[in-house]
Image (cartoon, grey):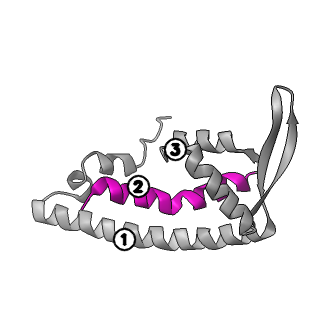
Amino acid sequence: MNIENAQVQMRKGILEFCILHIISRGEVYASDMLEELTSARIMVVEGTLYPLLTRLKNAGLLDYKWVESTSGPPRKYYLLTDIGRASLKGMNDTWQELSDSVNSIVSKTETHKAAVNGLTPAESSGSAGEATSPPPSPEN
C-alpha cells in the first residue's frame, strides 16, 4: 500500500467540506481560501480549487459576486447558498459521526498497545498522547 496515496485520498475527501466551512463564514476570495487551506496543512493548488468551486456552484451549493478592486481587475467572491448551508449541516453531522467512530477505534488501538506493552495509553502513543492531554492549570 502506498501511504502517500492514502494520505492524498484522505485529504481530497475532506477538501469540499473544508471549503464549504471557509465560505460559510462570509464572502471569500479564492486566494484567501488557498491561504487558509495551506496554513491548515491541506495542500491544494489553484488547478484543484477552481474546478471544485465551479462544481460546487453548478451543484447550487455556492454562488459568487464580482467586486471591483482598487488594485486590479474585479475579484470574484464566493458565498454559500441556502442549499449550500443545508448541505454543510448534513456534512457536519456526518463528520461528527465519522470522527467519533474513528476516534473510538484509534482509542481502542492505543489502549490495546498500552496493555501489550505494560504502559498507559498516553505513554504508548508517545508525543501524540502529550498533545491531547490538557494544558497545566495556571497557578493562582
Please tell me the numbered disc located at residue 104: 1
- Residue found at x 11% / y 65%: 116
Front label number (2 vs 3): 2
- Secondary structure type for disc 1: helix
Q: Residues within 10 Å of mark 2 (few under 14, many from 20)?
A: few
Check disc 3 and report its element: helix, strand or loop: loop
Query: Which residue, given by chain and number where applicable, does mark 2 sit on?
Result: 8
Quarter-of-image position of residue 3: bottom left
- Along the line of sight, which residue is nearer the eye, 53 or 104? 53
Residue 7 part of the magenta-drawn span: yes
Q: Residue at x 48, y 58 (%)?
A: 12
Amino acid identity at mark 2: Val
Percent position (x, y) of residue 120?
Answer: 21, 58
Task: Examine the rendering and report whether any part of residue 39 can be seen.
Answer: yes
Point out the tag, 3 or 1, that comes first from the N-terminus.
3
Start and end of the magenta stretch?
1-25
Above or below: residue 26 compared with residue 87: above
Please identify the residue farthest to the top as the structure is shown. Answer: 71
Q: Earlier in the sequence, mark 1 or mark 2?
A: 2
Q: Are marks 2 and 3 in contact (CB under 8 Å)?
A: no
Q: Residue furthest left?
A: 117
Mark 1–mark 2 distance (CA, rounded to whole Å) = 23 Å
Q: Which mark is residue 63?
A: none
Choose mark 1 or mark 2, whichever is in front: 2
